[in-house]
Image: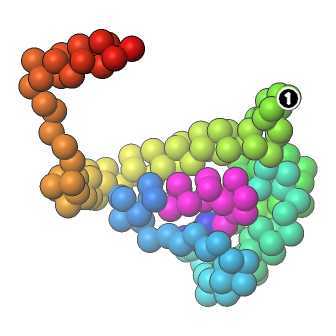
Amino acid sequence: MELFGLGSSGTTAQEMQFRLERIRVPCWHRLDAHKALTNAALLGPGDVAIGFSHSGRTREVIEVLAEAAEQGALTVAVTSFDKSPLAEAADVVLTTAVHETTFRLAALSALHGQLVAVDLIYVAVAQRTYARTTEAFEVTARAVEAHRLHDEPTSHRRRHARRGDAAE
């Protein structure tokens, strides 16, 4: 699976890669358009390419999806505009909604809607691969367990909280 997006849409692609890798779904997110294009050229039937672009008009993302489609891969667009060039290049379009405000331009706000789409895809894949997913969770949780701090006793937490309150 090839995942591609630039700017904040690239952040979404990176998050999707993290989630899918955690459940043993091979996927790649490239930060460079040339690398993404060469990877898309190696896809074929049975593979998936997902392009993330709020506007649906980011040339590099459209090109990556078009290359993947040319090779026979299933293409998915995650965009806020279902009539955009990216949407037209895709087999499946997941449309997100964005609420623009004074300090949150639409392109910056798009991240939230894109993350919802990523979460829905992730959960759908996890449900369809339940046994593999639960085993992967167990294995990966054990791998990082030594790097987690364990809860301290309740009385120790209260003592620290009182000291912090006194300093205020």
Residue 84 lies in quadrant: bottom right
Q: Is residue 132 visible?
A: yes
- Within 10 Å of the Cα at label 1, are there few (<14), some (14-19), or many (20+) other Cα atoms? few
Residue 41 lies in quadrant: bottom right
Q: Which of 111 and 153 lies nearest the eye of the viewer?
A: 153
Taking the image as shown, residue 35 lies to the left or right of residue 139, namely right
Q: Position of residue 83 (x, y in %)?
A: 90, 50
Report the label total.
1
Taking the image as shown, residue 11 lies to the left or right of residue 53, namely left
Residue at the image position 74 percent from the left and 38 percent from the top: 109
Question: Which SS does the magenta portion mostly show?
Answer: helix
Let me know if residue 9 is in the magenta part. yes
Q: Please, which residue is most extreme toward the front here?
A: 167
- The quarter of the picture where the C terminus appears is top left
Residue at the image position 83 percent from the left and 28 percent from the top: 101
The magenta-colored residue range is 4-17
| Residue behind mark 1 | 102
Q: Position of residue 35 (x, y in %)?
A: 66, 83
Q: Which of 107 and 98 lies nearest the eye of the viewer?
A: 107
Q: Is residue 77 visible?
A: no
Q: Is residue 124 above or below residue 153?
A: below
